[in-house]
Image: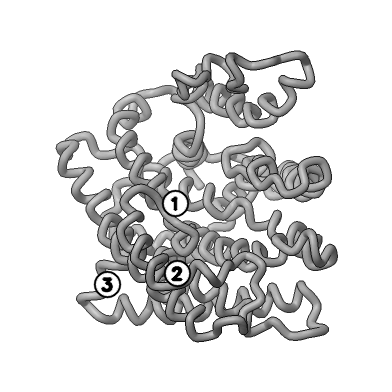
Amino acid sequence: MNNNLHHTVTDLPPRRRETIGWIDLLRVMAAFLVVFAHNCDSFIAAFSSDRSSFLTGVFAGSLTRPCVPLFVMMTGVLLLPVDTSMPLGAFYRKRIGRIIRPLIFWSIALPVMFTAYFSTVGSGSANPMVTLADYDSAGLLAKLYTWVFNFNFDTVPLWYIYMLIGLYLIMPVMSPWLARASRRDVGLLLGIWCASLFIPYLQMLAPHLGYRGNFGNMGLLGVCDWNAFGSLYYVSGFTGYLVLAFYLTKWPLQWSWSKTLAVCIPVFLGGYAITAGGYLQFQELFPGNYAYLEIIWLFCGINVTMMTVPVFIVVQKLAVKGSPLLTRLASLSFGVYLCHFIFVYMAYDLFDIAGLPAIVRIAGATIVSFAAALGLSALFRSVAPLRRFIA
């Protein structure tokens, strides 16, 4: 890849962006990994009743953690820097307006689908993630309007849409600086962002070093009950993945394949070892504390970043040629993300077969739920009034 690729990518109109082979491949990979991740969750939830299933879920699920960061990095490749000749309001209408309709539609459709399904199967579902008592008319009614405050269990994947709106809000503001910043300056910002990736672990370590917090609040670097925004808040989070993708596309690494693999494979494996091993260790230290368990799987933690960046670099270097099939699958990836969650729970019950190994159940459920989500996404794309609900 040459140094002009950045301009080649960002100058393409939306329709032609889908023909960039390596981006199409990343989109399909990321969508599949999201579905894979959610199919592992029910097995991880069995940690207190089925240790074998729990371990299988952890080791398989840990492999999937780059899924969301890869989606964010693709956004950075395709949109940064934002064309500053476009009025800010026009950019917001185009980008945020495009995902608001799917957000509203699936915030309503998924609870309806979940309630209909669990009302039908009743006690026939043994999924440890599900409380069947929540699926009555009162519970459904509450979900149909409380989505304006936040996502709920039935719409867990939609947390990404809320976050993506935030990224769209900041992208036009950061773009003028990115357009003129030197490689050194962007690298410095990324270094600061990398420091923020250690904050969750530092917050866990600090009490063991004598830190007692402020009035019971254990936040760091200025965070307290009356201030949630610490020193690194504004240079942390998913914004860093946007900038990192911009950096790696504008100044792609000029490494040979041997050097690329010699660096990327150990870094990925190191990140995976921390992620899977850390999850097991945290489960031992903090049994039943899901908040602590999530720390090791944070998308904006150093170990997940160690897994994400090698995947991005290797796929970027593959020089994948666009194909009609790959482009078609990539065009359905966002629809898969939006609708797959209900199929995950249906597939769990489908493969709830006594004696079937957990890894077989996870693999089978992943393939079936991914295929079902692809099918529904393709159906929506083929019907003009429905197309707007898969963006």
Q: Along the polypeptide, which appears first: circle 1 or circle 2?
A: 1
Q: Residue at x 81, y 41 (%)?
A: 285
Q: Along the polypeptide, which appears first: circle 2 or circle 3?
A: 2
Tell me the quarter of the picture where residue 67 sits.
Answer: bottom right
Task: Report whether 267 appears left or right of 52.
Answer: left
User: Compared to 295, does 378 lie above or below?
Assistant: below
Labels in figure, total: 3
Disc 1 marks a residue whose amino acid type is Trp
**The C terminus appears in which quarter of the rendering?**
bottom left
Q: In this figure, which colouring scheme has been used for the structure? A: one colour
Q: What residue is shown with label 3?
A: 387
Disc 2 marks a residue whose amino acid type is Val
Whether residue 202 can be seen here: yes
Disc 3 marks a residue whose amino acid type is Arg
Disc 2 is placed on an element classified as: helix
Disc 3 is placed on an element classified as: helix
Disc 1 to disc 2, C-alpha distance: 15 Å
Q: What residue is shown with label 2?
A: 336
Give coordinates of residue 273: x percent, y percent. Answer: 79, 47
Mark 3 Cα shell of 10 Å, populated few (<14), some (14-19), many (≥20): some
Contact check, label 1 and label 2, Cβ < 8 Å: no
Q: What residue is shown with label 1?
A: 159
User: Compared to 193, does 256 lie above or below?
Assistant: below
Give coordinates of residue 61: x percent, y percent. Answer: 69, 59
